[in-house]
Image (spheres, grey):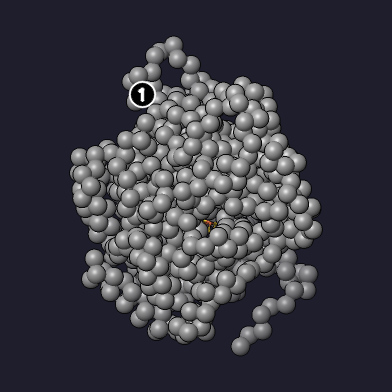
Amino acid sequence: MSGSREQILGRIRSNLTQAAGPLRETPEVLEKRTIAHERGIRPSRVDKDAAGLVDLFVQRAEKVNATVARIASIDDIPDALATYLANENLPAAFRMSDNPDLNAVPWDKRPALEITKGASDGKDEVGLSRAVGGVAETGTLILASGKESPTSLNFLPETHVVMVKRSEIEGTYEDGWDMVRAKGALSRAVNFITGPSRTGDIEQTIYLGAHGPRRLHILLVDDA
Amino acid sequence: MQPHSHNFKANASHALKNKNLQSALSQMKVGFIERRQTAVDDMPEFEELRDQARDLKNHTLANLDFYLERYEQKATEAGGHVHWAATAAEARKIILDICESVDAKNVTKGKSMISEEIALNDAIEAAGLNVVETDLGEYIVQLRKEPPSHIIAPAVHVLRSEVEDAFREEHKHLADERRLTEPSDLLNEARQVLRQKYMEAEVGITGANFLIAETGSSVIVTNEGNGDLTQTLAKVHIVIASIEKVVPTLEDASSILRVLARSATGQDFSSYTTFSTGPRRPEDLDGPEQYHVVILDNGRSELLGGEFQDALRCIRCGACMNHCPVYHAVGGHSYGWVYPGPIGSVLTPTFLGVEEAGHLPNASTFCGRCESVCPMRIPLPKMMRHYRVKEYENGLSPPSVRAGLDIWGFFARRPSLYRMASRLGSFALRVMGGKRGRADSLPLAGGWTDHRDMPIPTGPTFQDQWSARGGRRRPSR
Ligand code: SF4
């Protein structure tokens, strides 16, 4: 309702101009600040070289109940995934996003793996996605929606497997935003995912697998 | 919900006698505090991060008009619809109109305190639609037909056995022999029932932890993933957010996120932080076809430039109530409206008026723990004191309190009389306490001595001790 818009903004403006403290800036200054992507304090826990950041990423992800498989090259993904599924007593079937890197995996090495592609309809037990990158400070994966990465795949399957390369592990969320921005226009949904779904709503005890995935498995591919 | 904050005293004494509630509260008391401390210890820059978060929000609030307009422009460019609601009634109408426009029958909801503030569920149901809360805690309190008792842990007052009772009552498909005693049983049951709801819903409603001016995005932070399923699977996603949720950039949101989860649940980071920008794009395989944002004022703009502006920095982490001895004793429902605990004692009188909620700022021991943990450094005790003054000035304090204060004021303005009276009082108490050094009943202090003994002063008054040790009096002017 446009009447309310003017009313609300008008009230804000008049109260702020009356109080006009030193924090009130000109539109030019604010304009600059909005596009400058200025960063705040950088947590010292990420003061590490690339290998150190990868270790921190793994350590933090495992701390929040994700599992991580370090893999030498994409050629080893079929074996690694088949083994993981067998160990977890899961069917050798999954739905994956239609992503060039995932398509490039030599899946025929494990012909028993049954692969479907695209968005999830809620019936898939396992989903496989490709991350934009990982953030070491909290073991967080960044996924950006698009035709190569449907959001439903991140939340509907009980087991979510995500592929990310070593070179895509950065220190902080802000580093993560640079990776996202480098890919072009901001996706409809950008998911920061840190461990599997959980809840503390029954007597404040944490249980995994509330509505989203019960398991989060990270395939960390060595491309360095 | 219908406020009943004016009944705080009665609510509280009811709560103190409620065994289940007391047992649930005793569990939360330690858990939240320990977890937060562990998370804070793991982040050496935490105090600087709090300063930064405070400054950032102060900057944003001082320039809120600019950032809201920028947010609106960017959200619209991304294909979203931005609606402005000055009042709760207006927000409800906007949301119901959207539901009607797509002929919605089923609505799912992610957790949103603002939707509680505007009593959205009642309005949706009154319009003949089904609405289901998808956050497990919210779902539990919805089944129990009660409001949440905590802003991030809505069912913190409910015991596990009571969750089972609520499920058995409402989930008619459950066979009697189906085991529901383990938390994992309850979780599976809720998961199954709610999966169906996500799929059926035409409209999904979520709140927002932040709105980003730079990009026009809305941000939700959850652990369960329910908010994401709500907003991804429905045809229409409606975000309801209040004006103070906007921050300038993605970097700014990231900075504040570093103090949010640590203060709230004591996690390093919540499982899911999602930035949503507009509806499904042509090439997307999923996501909502329509994306609406309702920006709610509901009295907040009046706080700008005034003594309560700082309250608008609140990021609703719940740390103040997690650390509040009064909240620990009486739980969230005693506060009688949507926002409990110290922040509730500040917000409720602001939204509902001092007449309805003027008692709440008295529900404080002024121990200062809330301010000491608030990630946004909101001076909560100072604000409660403001309200106490207002309550007194407006003549709303009970006559006994006014009379007591008047008497105290009389003596306080006459130092030598004050000293004499306190010596006399302390002597009288010692006589009444006898050898035990405690009194089990005292005139005018039944509210205290009905429940516990009053310890008796053991030595000379403070002022006598002070001058005996050579302490100086304030120089007279
Ligand atoms: S007042 Fe501070 S501690 Fe309380 S909920 Fe708001 S931000 Fe958290």
Residue at 76% across, 52% down: A224
Q: Secondary structure at mark 1?
A: loop
Name the kind of residue labelled 1 in the image: His
B66 is higher (above) or lower (below) than B267? below
Question: How far across and how far down the image is residue B129, in percent?
Answer: 23, 40
A44 is higher (above) or lower (below) than B166? below
Q: Nearer the viewer, residue B254 or B371?
A: B254
Residue B454 in view, yes or no? no
Question: How far across and how far down the image is residue A151, in percent?
Answer: 47, 45
Q: Quadrant of the N terminus of chain A?
A: bottom left
Q: Quadrant of residue A195?
A: top right
Q: Nearer the viewer, residue A64 or B62?
A: A64
Q: Quadrant of residue A127?
A: top right
- Determine which residue is flagged by label 1: B171
Residue A179 in view, yes or no? yes
Mark 1 nearby-residue class (10 Å; few <14, some 14–19, many ≥20): few
Residue at 39% across, 75% down: B65
Residue at 57% across, 71% down: A37
Residue at 42% across, 64% down: B216
Q: Chain of mark 1?
A: B
* Side of B180 relative to B47 (left or right): left
How many numbered callouts?
1
* Side of B371 relative to A122 (left or right): right
Can you name the residue that lies furthest to the bottom here?
B477
* Side of B418 relative to B464 (left or right): left
Q: Nearer the viewer, residue B266 or B389?
A: B266
Question: How far across and how far down the image is residue B38, in percent?
Answer: 70, 48
Question: How far across and how far down the image is residue A100, in percent?
Answer: 56, 47
